[in-house]
Image (cartoon, grey):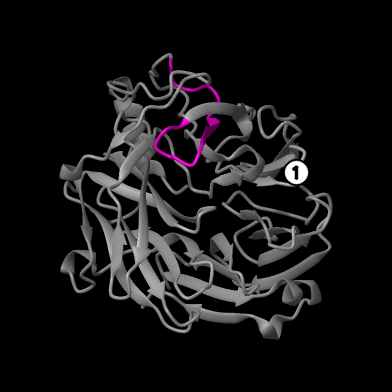
Amino acid sequence: MKIKSFSHLAFTLLAPFLFIGCSAIKGSKSTLYNSESESSIFELISNSDDLRIKNRNFEQVPTIAASADGKQIFVAWYSGGAAPGPGNYVTLSLSLDSGKSWLNDQLVVYPKNQSHRFFDPMLWRDHQGSIRLFYGSAKDNLIWDGFGGVNSLQMAWNGEKITTSKSLRLSDGVMSNKPLYLESKNTILFPIYIDKPLSGGNLDKNYPKNGVFIYSSNSDINQLKYYSSINIEEDLRIHDEPQLVQISNSGDLLAMLRTTKGIYYTNSSDFGKSWTPIKTFTATGPTTSSRFYLGKLSSGNLLLIANNSNTRNKMTAFLSKDGGKTWPHKLLLDVRENVSYPDADQTIDGNIHVVFDRDRTGAKDILYCKFTENDLISGNLDAIFKSRVNK
């Protein structure tokens, strides 16, 4: 996540006031409430010529999901305001020609009050083939404030425009990575986290001591319940951004997390109800403190996309055939500096669709690329298709 000194200052000054009405997470065992988002605080803009969404100072944190057949590819990210903070909005683009061209700003989640922000979108094609947009919300640049949390709406392309369901607030916290559907349990796991508070703040006693929580639901995502949590040492925490993947049908799961020292990992043998102590992830070489992508391909092999470096460069796709123990295959997607926050989806034709950002306040690139698992295994750089999503 992306909140720098301004939000830290705001958090320290306002911490005593953040917990009024904040009952969703009282500790690791609580059940989340849900309610409809207050329509008075946001609007959905579908006019790409709207002047309010022009003249952007930055563009960052992209996410991608495609229809199963690949005929529609959706990419969302956030911008708006002077910097990450008040006034941020989520914007969504669409490609109808396999990523060759993009229709920008087809749907924008925009704050009516410029002291509010919408950020960290996450697109997900669920097990029924529906596309869902999740996004974060907050007031005054804050994360834990009784309003901020994870929101969701279902959307589709009707041939002329994007249609949506009503937006629902699902929980406190942030979910910047995709949920995981456990088919044998008919259960969806949601990797949600609460940012680490600054030391020295006058914090409510119910502020979560450990901010990585996993919640579950059946097919009705409107009813989330506490499922488990992952313990991370406080000196390693920054923006946890947990990611989950199932590695066997007998209950084995792998979770990876962002820390101050790069990627760490943990395992579960009971469908994520309990987790081993976290360990440093070293199987691909160096990693940096930034969001990455972890998922399972249709072959059953695992895909990891991350900065193969101690800094935000060398965006690289890795493949594991043994449940994440080794990652012998890799494909360099972008060698440049300031490339970060990848996300991916695979369609039934075998194509792997990837997005990431580059130079958020300079070039302001939202970049798309496409390749296959065989391209990754063979290291075929020439096979990678690339385009720029935003104009």
In this rendering, the answer to whether 32 lies above or below 167 is: above
Q: Is residue 234 magenta?
A: no
What is the quadrant of residue 391 in the picture? bottom left
- Report the front residue among 305 and 71: 71
- Report the front residue among 277 and 296: 296
| Residue at 55% from the left image edge and 26% from the top image edge | 210
Side of 382 where 169 appears, left or right: left
| Residue at 68% from the left image edge and 74% from the top image edge | 372
Q: Does residue 369 show up? A: yes
- Report the front residue among 97 and 314: 97
Q: Which residues are magenta?
A: 206-224
Residue at the top extreme?
205
In this rendering, the answer to whether 119 lies above or below 222 is: below
Query: Which secondary structure, mark 1?
Result: loop
| Residue at 25% from the left image edge and 69% from the top image edge | 55
The residue carrying mark 1 is 249
**Residue 167's spot in the image, x, y percent?**
30, 46
**Residue 175's spot in the image, x, y percent?**
47, 43
What is the quadrant of residue 130 in the picture? bottom left
Side of 332 where 85 appears, left or right: left
Main secondary structure found in the magenta portion: loop
**Neighbourhood count class around disc 1 (C-alpha, 10 Å): few under 14, some 14–19, many 20 upward:** few
Amino acid type, callout 1: Asn
What is the quadrant of residue 6 in the picture? top left
Q: Does residue 85 show up? A: no
**Residue 309's spot in the image, x, y percent?**
69, 59
